[in-house]
Amino acid sequence: MTEEPAVAAADQSAPEEPAQEKPAQEKTVQADPWDDPRLPWSGKPRRVDVLLWAGITLSGIYYLALLPFRASLVGTHPVLLEVLNGSTEAIVSGAAFARVGHGSLTVVLLAAIPGLMKFDLLYWLAGRIWGERIILLLSGRRKHGPRFMARVQRWGWKFTWPAVVVAPFLPVPNVIVYATAGWAGMSWVTFLVLDAIGSLLWAGMLAGLGYTLGQHAVTVAQTVSRYGLWISIGIVVLIVIGQVRNSRRHR
C-alpha cells in the first residue's frame, strides 16, 4: 500500500516529453516551363518575342521552300532567283548571262541587294531585344558569339561597323554578326547602310567572277537547270540526312 503513492508521485514529477514535430514536407520547386535555354527570352514571352521568333522561323522555312526551284531557275531566270534567294550561283549565272548579251550587269548587282538583305534586319532586331541569349543561341557550340561580344566590349563601334560590312566574306554565320550589332546598340539606319555596302561588295565579287567566265558559266547553269529536278531531290535528301545525324548526336 505504501509503494503506490510513491509511484504516482514519481509519475507526476516526471517531465512530459515534448511531442516530436513531424518533419516539414519539402517544398517542390516547379521549374518555369518558359525558362528554356533553347529560347532566346527568359520567362513568359511578350508579343514582340512571339512575333520576332515567328519571323525568324518563317525565314528558315522560306529558304527551304525555295530549294526545289533553285536548280531550275539558275539557268533560266537567274535575276529572279537573285531577288528571291540572293544565292551565289544566281549572281554568278546572272553576270555570265549579261556577258553574252542576255541582261544587264547593273540589274544583276541591284537585284542581289534585296535578295541578300531581306531577313538581316530581323537578326539585328533580335540582338537588340534579346541580347546575349540570341547570340549564344545562334553560335551554338561555336565560340564565335562570345568572341564577338568580347571584341565589341573592347573596341565598340570600331569593331561592329567593319564587321557588318565584311560579314558576307567571313567564315562565320552572318546572323551572328548582325545580332551582335543589334546587341551593341547600332542604329537600324546605320546597320542597313553598312549591310547594303557589304552586300554590294559581295555581289560585285561574284558578278565579276561570272562576267569573267561568260559562256562557260552559262553552259554550266543551263545544264544544272536541265537536271534541276534530280539536283533538287539530291539536295533535299542531303538535308534530311544531316538533320537525322544531328538529332542522333543530341540524343
Image: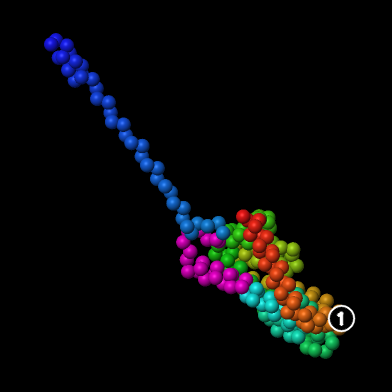
* Residue 109 visible to an observer of this rendering: no
As drawn, is 95 to the left or to the right of 150?
Answer: right
Residue ID for mark 1: 216
Q: Nearer the viewer, residue 213 or 64?
A: 64
Q: Nearer the viewer, residue 120 or 238?
A: 238
Q: Position of residue 31 (x, y in %)?
A: 46, 53
Q: Is the N terminus in the top left, top right, bottom left or bottom right quadrant?
A: top left
Looking at the image, residue 131 lies above or below residue 82: above
Q: Callout 1, which amino acid?
A: His
Q: Position of residue 175 (x, y in %)?
A: 65, 66
Which residue sits at x=62%, y=71%?
60
- The magenta-colored residue range is 39-61
Looking at the image, residue 194 lies above or below residue 96: above
Q: Quadrant of residue 233?
A: bottom right
Q: Residues within 10 Å of mark 1 (few under 14, many from 20)?
A: few
Looking at the image, residue 223 lies above or below residue 156: below
* Residue 243 visible to an observer of this rendering: yes
Q: Position of residue 52 (x, y in %)?
A: 54, 69
* Prevailing SS of the magenta stretch: helix
Q: Quadrant of residue 159?
A: bottom right
Which residue sits at x=65%, y=73%?
64
Which residue sits at x=15%, y=14%?
5
